[in-house]
Image: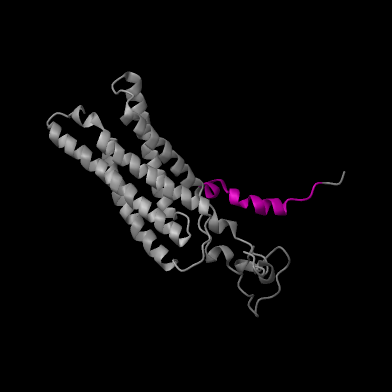
């Protein structure tokens, strides 16, 4: 029954493509800001998962010995199984194309793409638990197909963890300069800001990048999902604001 989730994942991926591709087209002319290693992991992981899904479709002998629910013919169940597997292969082919496009644009995987990858990793974990139970009970042999499924789970788990910890691509928001103070606004006391419009950003002359340098980056603008969940992007700010140790 877990195979029935493949068409739903494909539909969700089509929505992700509708959101992500226009954003990449708008930023295609920008400078490369994402690390090459992360882009390589996205491309290689999508390629391996596409190959593993296709291998399952070609080599899976379970189509001839699957349990047929009452009232359904074996041919209908086999056709449904093949259709769901084809949806999974088509989804990973689209992910591979999207990863290549993101690598060409110099961007990390988008938030919508990373959410989809984590959802796919969760589904792979459920399939892995089902396969382990079948292997333990002896209802399925440890053949090439079982090894292929275990390999697909391992790669999907790694891709899901990378998506969880992968930061956003640095954008203009990550290097945004603070707005100039209004002439009508009074001087702000040090460390307190000026009322409702208080800012924690450094002054413009400190935030401006030096010649040939990248400049100071807003950690929140590029924080990963894991960093946002755990607020670890605040560690640098807290370290700067911590008092120095007392003299010995």
In which quadrant is the C terminus drawn?
top right
- Look at the image and tell me whether residue 135 can be seen: yes
* Relative to 72, residue 42 above or below: below
Q: Could you tell me residue 193's position as x and y percent?
A: 67, 66
Give the main secondary structure, helix, strand or loop, of the magenta stretch. Answer: helix
Q: Could you tell me residue 199's position as x and y percent?
A: 63, 65
Q: Residue at x 32, y 40 (%)?
A: 53
* Relative to 165, residue 81 above or below: above
**Magenta residues (range):** 226-245
Left or right position of 56 against 238: left
Q: Could you tell me residue 18's position as x and y percent?
A: 33, 60
> Within the magenta stretch, is there residue 233?
yes
Left or right position of 121 against 242: left
Q: Residue at x 52, y 57 (%)?
A: 34
Q: Residue at x 34, y 23 (%)?
A: 135
* Relative to 126, residue 204 above or below: below
* Relative to 110, residue 162 above or below: above
> Within the magenta stretch, is there residue 218?
no
- Look at the image and tell me whether residue 167 can be seen: no
Query: Of residues 185 and 200, which is closer to you in this image?
Result: 200
In which quadrant is the N terminus drawn?
top left
Left or right position of 234 against 3: right
Q: Residue furthest right?
A: 248
Instruction: Count the numbered circles shown.
Output: 0
Indicate how the structure is coloured in the image. one colour
Q: Could you tell me residue 211's position as x and y percent?
A: 66, 70
Query: Of residues 117 and 186, which is closer to you in this image?
Result: 117
Q: Quadrant of residue 195?
A: bottom right
């Amino acid at each position: 029954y877990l195979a029935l989730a493949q068409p739903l994942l494909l539909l969700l991926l089509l929505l992700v493509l509708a959101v992500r591709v226009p954003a990449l087209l708008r930023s295609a002319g920008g400078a490369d800001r994402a690390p090459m290693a992360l882009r390589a992991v996205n491309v290689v992981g999508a390629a391996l998962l596409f190959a593993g899904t296709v291998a399952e479709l070609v080599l899976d002998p379970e189509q001839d010995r699957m349990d047929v629910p009452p009232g359904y013919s074996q041919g209908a169940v086999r056709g449904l199984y093949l259709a769901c597997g084809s949806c999974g292969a088509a989804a990973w082919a689209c992910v591979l194309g999207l990863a290549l496009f993101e690598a060409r644009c110099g961007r990390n995987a988008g938030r919508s793409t990373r959410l989809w990858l984590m959802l796919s990793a969760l589904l792979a974990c459920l399939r892995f638990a089902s396969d382990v139970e079948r292997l333990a009970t002896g209802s399925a042999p440890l053949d090439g197909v079982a090894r292929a499924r275990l390999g697909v789970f391992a790669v999907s788990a790694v891709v899901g963890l990378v998506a969880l910890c992968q930061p956003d691509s640095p954008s203009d928001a990550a290097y945004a300069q603070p707005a100039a103070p209004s002439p009508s606004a009074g001087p702000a006391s040090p460390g307190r800001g000026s009322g409702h419009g208080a800012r924690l950003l450094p002054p413009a002359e400190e935030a401006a990048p030096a010649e040939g340098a990248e400049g100071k980056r807003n950690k929140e603008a590029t924080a990963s999902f894991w960093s946002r969940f755990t607020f670890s992007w605040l560690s640098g700010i807290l370290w700067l604001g911590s008092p120095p140790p007392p003299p010995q």
